[in-house]
Amino acid sequence: MEEVNINNTSQDNNSSYTYDYGGYKPVEFIMKVVTIIIMCIGLPLTLVAIYAVCSLVKDDHVVPIYVINLLITDLIQLCCMIAWVLPEDWILSGRFILLSIYFYCLMVSIGFMVCIALERYLVIACPLWYRFRRTIKISVLVCVVVWALPPVISCLFIAARNPATISGILLLLPLPLFIFFLGGTLKALSASISVHSDEKRRIVGMLVLVLLIYTLLFLPTIILSLAWGSSGIDERNLYNLSLTFVQFSPLADLFLYIFMRKGTIDKLLASVCCCRMDSDDISSPV
């Protein structure tokens, strides 16, 4: 993914505006090829995943709703990736709009990742409270809030003197939440007797997956944003490559569906020693 930079080349006796990619064409080529591959693989698989997750809503009132919204944001991101593939002259007027929509959906996707992790944590840590509080109305309200939150955050960016630093700090906030949800779930596993052992494995696996997606794909870009904003580092090539990692998030989110299907990954998780639970637990839908 290349970052679009408009440079005034008047210093070189040329008053026109040109786009540059850090002056490193091989990086630009590699990122475009990776973007095309992600789009070709991600678009059909995401559509199939959305259809498959919709079929689970009748069995689970909350998790599929959050996952469906997450996959919708991924679908929009994949469509907006065309901004990095087509030549700049073709979509010069709409490039800024596509980039704005892409980063808007990126922030929304992080919000739904937090919702998924929180819901999975409540299933184990507060099963009775969660069982009586979970409703479709509440989950829909939460979805509306998550979709409406990025414009508020964008206003903070505009008002801030150093938008890169502010955005980096805000995007770091989910990390301690993911760690807390995973640690709290692992701590409460032994006391939870109302959830079947297979479901416990899937819950832990989903929390680990969400943490890995955020840490491996989002965290490098966030750290570089903080470094760029605080120290004035201008490593465009390194920053653009880190953004390429972010482009893989729609593909990584597809694995969440695997942890929602009973029996799909239970045998694999059961083979991991740290995921072994008492198989005599009482089964209960979550």
Image (tube, rainbow, N blue to C red):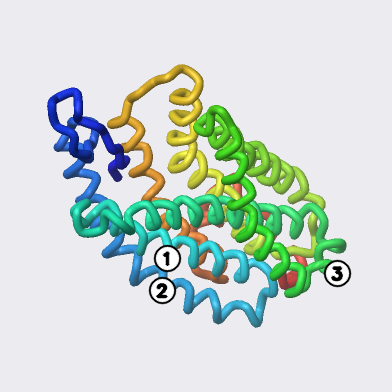
Q: Mark 1 points at which residue?
A: 75
Q: If the image is split into quadrants, where does the C terminus sit?
A: bottom right
Report how many numbered discs are placed on residues in the image. Answer: 3
Residue 47 - label: 2
Q: What residue type is labelled 1?
A: Leu
Residue nearer the viewer, 262 or 118: 118
Label 1 residue SS: helix
Q: In this view, does 45 lie to the left or right of 66?
A: left
Q: How far apart are marks 1 and 2 (CA)?
A: 8 Å
Residue nearer the viewer, 113 or 228: 228
Residue nearer the viewer, 131 or 112: 112
Circles 2 and 3, Cβ within 8 Å, touching? The answer is no
Residue 92: percent from left, percent from top: 26, 54
Circles 1 and 2, Cβ within 8 Å, touching? The answer is yes
Residue 125 - label: none
Instruction: Give the answer, above or below, for where 187 lies relative to 96.
Output: above
* Mark 3 Cα-neighbour bin, 10 Å: few <14, some 14–19, many ≥20: few
Q: Mark 3 points at which residue?
A: 132
Q: Which amino acid does label 2 sit on?
A: Leu
Q: Which residue is drawn at 44% across and 52% down?
A: 100
Q: In which quarter of the image is residue 178?
A: top right
Residue 112: percent from left, percent from top: 60, 57
Q: Is residue 192 left or right of residue 97?
A: right
Residue 276 makes an appearance in the image: no
Q: Residue at x 79, y 64 (%)?
A: 194
Nearer the observer: mark 1 or 2; the answer is 1
Q: Which residue is drawn at 41% across and 75% down?
A: 48
Q: What residue type is labelled 3?
A: Phe
